[in-house]
Image (tube, grey):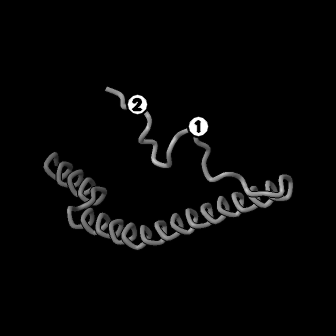
Amino acid sequence: MRWKRNVSLERDRARLAMTLIELLVVISIIGVLAGLTLPAIQAARESSRRMSCQSRMRQIGLALSNYDAAHRQLPAASIRPLGSTDNGRDRPRAT
């Protein structure tokens, strides 16, 4: 009797547990799904970056337009101290 009870328990455990093949199938399905979704995620990120860049460029253009309307000239491209050259060669070098 005791032997039959042990066999019955082992069968119940075997039915509840996953086999190695089932586990490998589940892992491979998850891998395939991840492989299919990653390119779509990357495309969405790239689109977001492009829209962000376009928005920033538009804001810079509006700022330049507003500056021109207020001052009747565009802002200076750079501001250098008096007496300096274009490439900054007259500055003392740090040693």
- Which percent across, then down, holds residue 71? 83, 52
Task: Identify the residue at image location x=39%, y=66%.
Answer: 34
- Which percent across, then down, holds residue 21? 21, 67
Characterize the local packing of mark 1: few (<14), some (14-19) or many (20 or more) Cα atoms within 10 angstroms: few
Which kind of residue does numbered mark 1 sit on? Pro
Quadrant assignment, res 23: bottom left
Q: Is residue 2 above or below residue 7?
A: above
Residue linked to disc 1 = 81
Q: Is residue 9 above or below residue 49?
A: above
Task: Identify the residue at image location x=45%, y=47%.
Answer: 87
| Residue farthest along the front direction in this orientation | 83
**Which element carries disc 1, helix, strand or loop?**
loop
Residue linked to disc 2 = 92
Image check: 56 left or right of 40?
right
The CA distance from mark 1 to mark 2 is: 14 Å
Task: Identify the residue at image location x=31%, y=26%.
Answer: 95
- Per the rendering, the mark at residue 24 is none
- Which percent across, then down, holds residue 66? 81, 56
Quadrant assignment, res 38: bottom left
Which kind of residue does numbered mark 2 sit on? Pro
Characterize the local packing of mark 2: few (<14), some (14-19) or many (20 or more) Cα atoms within 10 angstroms: few
User: In this figure, what is the number of numbered marks?
Assistant: 2
- Which percent across, then down, holds residue 41? 48, 66
Image check: 9 left or right of 68?
left
In the image shown, does 94 or 52 lie closer to the viewer?
94
In the image shown, does 54 or 4 lie closer to the viewer?
54
**Which element carries disc 2, helix, strand or loop?**
loop
